[in-house]
Image: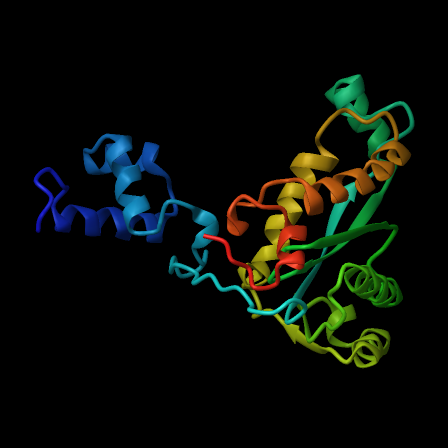
Amino acid sequence: MATPHRTAATVEARVCHLRQTRKIGPARLGPVLGLPASIVHRILVRHGLNRLAHLDRPTGQVIHRYERARLGELVHVDVKKLGRIPDGGGHKVLGRQAGRARRSSMGFDYIHSAVDDHSRLAYSEVHADEKAATCAEFLRRAAAFFAGHGITRIERVLTDNAWPYRKSFAWRQTLADLGAVGKLTRIYRPQTNGKVERFNRTLLDEWAYLRPYTSNTERTAALADFLHTYNHHRCHTALGGQPPISRVNNPAGQYT
């Protein structure tokens, strides 16, 4: 049965086409199409195009989401580069100009993270680099963390195509020692590793940029509290509003 006031199918098709080809939102699509932005938004929601994060950027096609059925079946690993904070604070404490001048010589931290696909249980460490040995040792400790929470077997590890994951003996040896298989994302398709990419955004919003830290040491020390909150208390929309530890304790994953 047709909805009385629904936008014509031809108009909806044009909205979808422009969204997928031009990657712009309702506020900009509306004037182009002669439609209120609110109607454009409803059309995009109806067709699953309302979030750019759900689209493959080069093609505009909707990325089909998946979830592994077992704990440890797939672990996503990634590294996020983050500017260090000088003692006394950066631009959020001192103001943009003064903070930039002090921060420019500080270098970077590399936040290594691993996320279990089924439960979204996450583990992160702060390091000074992303060299092969660092990546390999991080994976060993991540596996120990997961084992301590009941995920005793990691079957596959998904990473991007960075050299340490593709070529290093240390990484391959660690995978072998864990009995895991390495898997690489498709080139130029970081969305394939979307669960850890999404975790990285949460990491920035709810830890790295949560408040004006007065030193790099202070920010690093705050990571443990963030991880505990994320894993044990923070509601996760993909888990029916439950935290990741709930799915570890309930592997059947009975969430809506």
Q: Decide which of 254, 205 is in the foreground and name it.
A: 254
Of 123 and 60, nearer the camera is 123
Residue at (13, 50) in percent of width and height: 10
Instruction: Examine the rendered structure and indicate whether residue 49 appears above or below residue 178.
Output: above
Return the x and y of residue 16 as percentages of the image width and height: 27, 50
Residue 91: image quadrant is: top right
Taking the image as shown, residue 39 lies to the left or right of residue 65, namely left
* Label total for image: 0
From the viewer's perspective, tell me whether residue 203 is left or right of residue 255: right
Answer left or right for 102 relative to 146: right
Q: Nearer the viewer, residue 69 or 46?
A: 69
Q: Quadrant of residue 179?
A: bottom right
Q: Residue at x 11, y 45 (%)?
A: 8
Q: Position of residue 54 (x, y in %)?
A: 45, 53
Image coords of residue 14 (percent x, y) = 21, 49
Using residue 215 as the reference point, say whether residue 147 is left or right of it.
left
Viewer-proximal residue, 233 or 54?
A: 233
Question: Residue drawn at (14%, 41%), measured in percent from left and top?
Answer: 6
Task: Name the image colouring.
Answer: rainbow
Percent across and percent down for residue 132 are 84, 67
Query: Measuring 67% from the left and 57% from the top, which residue is drawn there?
Result: 249
